[in-house]
Amino acid sequence: MVVYGIWTFCAAILAFAISAVVGKFLIPYLHKLHFGQTILEDGPKWHKEKQGTPVMGGIMFIVAITFVTLVSTLVYLFTGAEFIETYRADVGKEAIYIFAGLGLALANGIIGFVDDYTKVVKKRNLGLTAIQKLIAQFAVAAVYLLVLALSGCGTETVIPFVGKVDLGFFYYIISAVVIVGIVNAVNLTDGVDGLDGSITFFVAVAFMLIGSALYCLGITAFSAAVAGACLGFLVWNFHPAKVFMGDTGSLFLGGMVCALAFAVKMPILLLPLGIVYLCEMFSVILQVGYFKLTHGKRLFKMSPIHHHFEMCGWSEVKIVAVFSAVTAVFGVISFLLVSFGVKFPIY
């Protein structure tokens, strides 16, 4: 266990280093290509100073997470025989969830890249239409779920203090909606320097601890890679941001958060762990709905909700600190729920 602990730590450090170093070379290159952000006219006025800040910075943590995940999981597959015997771990099935989850995240990152590229080329803050994004995202979710089905992963989900619940065919319908919803919720959270990266860092740390508690050490290293890569990105993205992750990064992170939740067979954990993401998403839904029902009145000063707090006078650093603290608290709650409410092995 000590060896696997060191290995997990190394996965996080390596992902951090790769992400931070890639940023050193990527940011000047994005400047050279004039891949700068176009700020919305109806956004906070003080965001205008961010005009021209490079986008697609998410590439730096995508590279880091992909490389470290592939290496760590392959090492785990070829050296985990003793661990399998001791802890009854199904390393093969764990690897399926990891590789399929990485594919889910990368596919969503490609959708984001196309969206960002369209914005940059057209020099306006509009990329793919909402319908185009949704069709692509549901297609990606369907392929991901098909891969799991063909790999014999089943339709069971684990609920703390309840146990394994088989949802049958409804598992695929519910899962597709959850995946697309969370991916877009994470995307909406990206609007303040350092916010999305910080929130996802704490979510990844929670999944790292959960994976360890379940003796799913491949998932533990997978989560550690996400956490380390997010920190490496924050070196360049924390206020004042030198680069934005763009939809390339935020849609990738949305897919990654889903991948981690499904890897531990507990997408229900997205409710507590994704509390900030969900608040961001529902603030937009409520704002739009209220605006239409009242013929022009607003429920919030601006949505997503982080902009509401900005309009109330909160600094970007304060928003990141408070939202991160909330995520950390719910991360602890989630870890305790799994530690006391779930029996391993989960596969």
Image (tube, grey):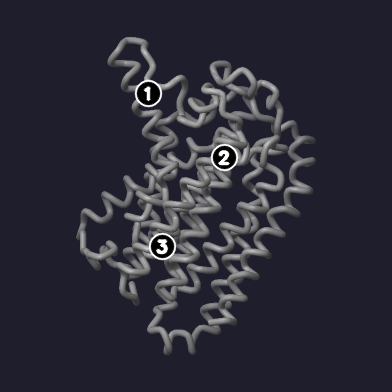
**Image depth: mark 1 or mark 2 in front:** 2
Cα distance in 3D space between marks 3 and 2: 22 Å
**Amino acid on which the number 3 mark rests in the picture:** Phe
Residue 19: x and y in percent read 68, 54
Residue 14: x and y in percent read 68, 65
Q: Does residue 43 appear to the left or right of 158 in the view shown?
A: right
**Amino acid on which the number 2 mark rests in the picture:** Val
Q: Look at the image and tell me in which quarter the C terminus lies.
A: bottom left
Q: Nearer the viewer, residue 210 or 233?
A: 210
> Do the numbered discs 1 and 2 sit on residues whose CB atoms are within 8 Å?
no
Residue identified by numbered label 1: 287
Residue 313: x and y in percent read 56, 24
Q: Which residue appears at 41% of the width and 62% of the height? A: 335
Q: Is mark 3 on a helix, strand or loop?
A: helix
Cα distance in 3D space between marks 1 and 2: 22 Å
Q: Is residue 258 above or below residue 30?
A: below
Q: Which of 331 and 151 is in front in this view?
A: 331
Q: Which of marks 1 and 3 is nearer the N terminus?
A: 1
The image quadrant of residue 333 is bottom left
> Do the numbered discs 3 and 2 sit on residues whose CB atoms are within 8 Å?
no
- Callout 2 crowding tier (Cα within 10 Å): few <14, some 14–19, many ≥20: many
Cα distance in 3D space between marks 1 and 3: 32 Å
The image quadrant of residue 68 is bottom right
Q: In this view, does 293 lie above or below 183?
A: above
Residue identified by numbered label 2: 320
Residue identified by numbered label 3: 335
- Callout 1 crowding tier (Cα within 10 Å): few <14, some 14–19, many ≥20: many
Q: Which residue appears at 35% of the width and 29% of the height? A: 285
Q: What element carries label 1?
A: helix
**Amino acid on which the number 1 mark rests in the picture:** Gln
